[in-house]
Image: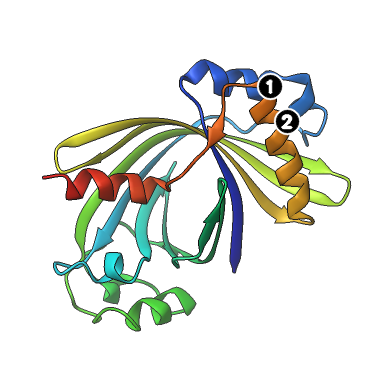
Amino acid sequence: MLEQELKLTAPRLEVLNDVFESPYVRQYSIGNPLPPARFLGIYYDTQDDSLRKAKCSFRARLEGSVFRAAFKSAGETIDGLFRHQEYETVIDGWLENVSLVPEGELKDVLLQLLGPNEPLVPRVKVDMQRRVMNLKIEETQIELVADQGVIAANDREHALFELELELKQGDIERIMAMGEYLKSNFSLVPSRLTKHQIGLGLWQTR
């Protein structure tokens, strides 16, 4: 499926808190924000960096008590708006090779790039505390996410405070308009890189 999300970077945690508590955001909220949860992810590649060369990413992530795997295509990025194809499935745990991924669309996509028993090498670790609020503006549904945590690779770390607005249904222009308001009223700037790309930068700096 096509994933479309606007990513905005904050300089500190307090900015994310202010956004979540603002009357502007709360007027569109559906119910209360979900309880904070730890999201621990590992991005994999092969020994010869097959996924990086194809400008794709593949991760396993522990979301509370559930493991999920996700593959994202290269896609495009324009002023913080990220568009790419995403394939996701529930898995049993951390992965050693593609053969451990359940049968389905995600596995089929991976097998176009990797051998079923080719070892998956952990490249980037992402350890985030995530908060989620669901928003609705007329017929447009948006998932508002606040992530705070650390991206680690190659014995280096990068602290991140990030806001994501993901389109679940409706008009992407609603997200862009909300993004403009948030940038104008809070200390937020469009993200240039995904978490995976930030981690790759750490990995390649040797």
Q: What residue does disc 2 label?
A: 181
Q: What residue does disc 1 label?
A: 185
User: Image point 28% across, 44% down: which residue?
Assistant: 125
Quadrant hosting residue 168: bottom right
Q: Please tell me the numbered disc located at residue 55.
A: none
How many C-alpha atoms fall within 10 Å of the one at disc 2: few (<14), some, or many (≥20)?
few
In the rendering, at what x and y percent does residue 132 appear?
60, 36
CB-based contact (under 8 Å), mark 2 and mark 1: yes
In the rendering, at what x and y percent does residue 86 appear?
51, 65
Query: From what the image shows, is residue 14 above or below residue 147?
Result: above
Real-space Cα separation, disc 2 to disc 1, in angstroms? 6 Å
In the rendering, at what x and y percent does residue 96 appear?
21, 65
Q: Nearer the viewer, residue 177 or 91?
A: 177
* The furthest residue to the left: 206
Quadrant hosting residue 183: top right
Residue 120: in sight, yes or no?
yes
| Tag 2 secondary structure | helix
- In the image, is 174 to the left or to the right of 12? right
- In the image, is 25 to the left or to the right of 129? right
User: Image point 38% across, 51% down: which residue?
Assistant: 61
How many C-alpha atoms fall within 10 Å of the one at disc 1: few (<14), some, or many (≥20)?
few
Q: Nearer the viewer, residue 164 or 181?
A: 181
User: Image point 43% across, 48% down: which residue?
Assistant: 194
In the rendering, at what x and y percent does residue 2 appear?
60, 66
- Inspect the image, locate mark 2, and give the three-letter code of the amino acid beneath it: Tyr
- Inspect the image, locate mark 1, and give the three-letter code of the amino acid beneath it: Asn
User: Image point 55% across, 45% down: which residue?
Assistant: 80
Quarter holding the C terminus is: top left
Query: From what the image shows, is residue 184 above or below residue 46?
Result: above
Query: From what the image shows, is residue 94 above or below residue 34?
Result: below
Quarter holding the N terminus is: bottom right
